[in-house]
Amino acid sequence: MGLDWGNWAELAVRWIHVIAGIAWIGSSFYFMWLDSHLRPPVPPRDGVSGELWSVHSGGFYQQHKFAVAPAEMPEQLHWFKWEAYSTWVSGVVLLALIFYLGAETNLVDRAKLDLQPWQAILIGLAAIVGGWLAYQGLCRSVLGKNLAVFAIVWLIVLAWIAFALTQIFADLGAFMHMGAIIGTVMAANVFFIIIPNQKKMVAQVRAGETPDAELGKQSKQRSVHNNYMTLPVLFIMISNHYPMIFGAPLNWLWLIALGVIGAAVRHFFNLKNAGLVRPGVLVMAAIAFVAVALLNEHVRRPAAVSGPVPTYQEIRRLVDRHCIMCHARAPSHRGIAVAPGGVTFDTEDDLRRHAHAIYDRAVTTHSMPLGNETGMTEAERARLGAWIKAGAKED
């Protein structure tokens, strides 16, 4: 048996993506916490706007923040940029491996729009670039000067993009492209704004010039934006495990709502770090989460399970037609060497063991087969659901 290089490559890239993401988000959270805990030095020091004493791992640390920049630059200056770049690059590679090389299965849904894989890929790339350009335009407009107003308008833009993508792509492909758009915005903030502005300020100090404070303000604006987008993009990263969200009617709305809840949780911690404990923010976020769950359940398409209970042999033929090419001990689907998640349907015991998951994915949410590649009909889903509801029994 040959080594499945595709799956190993995906594992390596996904692992890199998670590691880099932890490093990037961790540093973002830390510096937001640091900024909110800085206090004016006592006695005052010229040019120093805040200082912080901390203890960690048996050591004591003293940190200072300059109002704009120090009078002289040290020989060693540590930059925080590779975490962002590594996260974005690995994310793009992962997107290409799963959704572009596997566009026929994972991205195209011909029941929504009959696209060729290359057309779907171009639309996906255009959405990512267009999302960044829309964000950049908003930041440079008058709306960018007010965080609350900017957040509302940016949310509306994201909601429109999410709605459009869920009408074009397979549900999971649409969700992952929303994550790619937000991740690209965050990484581009670092690459195009934050790091270049910091380099300009460093050059100004070394040239004996007064640093441009506006550059620091602009970098701070983008850092705050990134901070609020971290939890929404983290949710998208794990959303592939929850078909009741990405495979549900109004999935674009649940995506946006859960993103807002994530931003609200981040806001609670930002306030807490600044010494303002507002438990009501968390309470409202929890209530909103429950509301999303209830509304999602209310509008979910009813599973059609009426009619006589089909025989196991009929279900066996149905599963062999639509599922077994991937979910087998020896998959026959191109590009799939091992059954996804290790879930196989070769025997009746396999089907009974995974009956609940099959019902959720194929009958309730219609998230399987991926992109409905095999053209599974509503009648077939209804027969499968009737068999499972009757106990998934053999004849």
Image: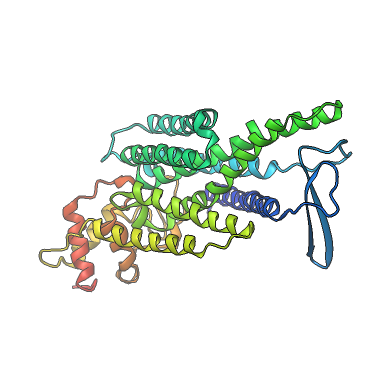
Above or below, comparing residue 264 to residue 186 in the picture: below
Using the rendered image of the protein, determine whether residue 94 is visible from the camera's viewpoint: yes
Instruction: Identify the residue shown where x is 32% and y is 58%.
Output: 361
Above or below, comparing residue 125 to residue 362 in the picture: above
Q: Is residue 132 left or right of residue 52?
A: left
Instruction: Identify the residue shown where x is 19% and y is 55%.
Output: 380
Q: Quadrant of residue 240?
A: bottom left
Question: Extreme left residue here?
Answer: 307
**Residue 306, percent from left and from top:** 12, 63
**Residue 297, percent from left and from top:** 28, 61
Instruction: Identify the residue shown where x is 44% and y is 51%.
Output: 260
Q: Quadrant of residue 245?
A: bottom left
Question: Extreme front residue here?
Answer: 43
Instruction: Identify the residue shown where x is 54% and y is 37%.
Output: 185
Closer-to-camera residue (87/25): 25
**Residue 175, percent from left and from top:** 41, 46
Q: How is the image coloured?
A: rainbow
Q: Is residue 298 left or right of residue 278?
A: left
Closer-to-camera residue (237/315): 237
Number of on-image labels: 0
Q: Is residue 61 left or right of residue 22?
A: right
**Residue 269, percent from left and from top:** 58, 58
Using the rendered image of the protein, determine whether residue 370 is visible from the camera's viewpoint: no
Closer-to-camera residue (38/170): 38
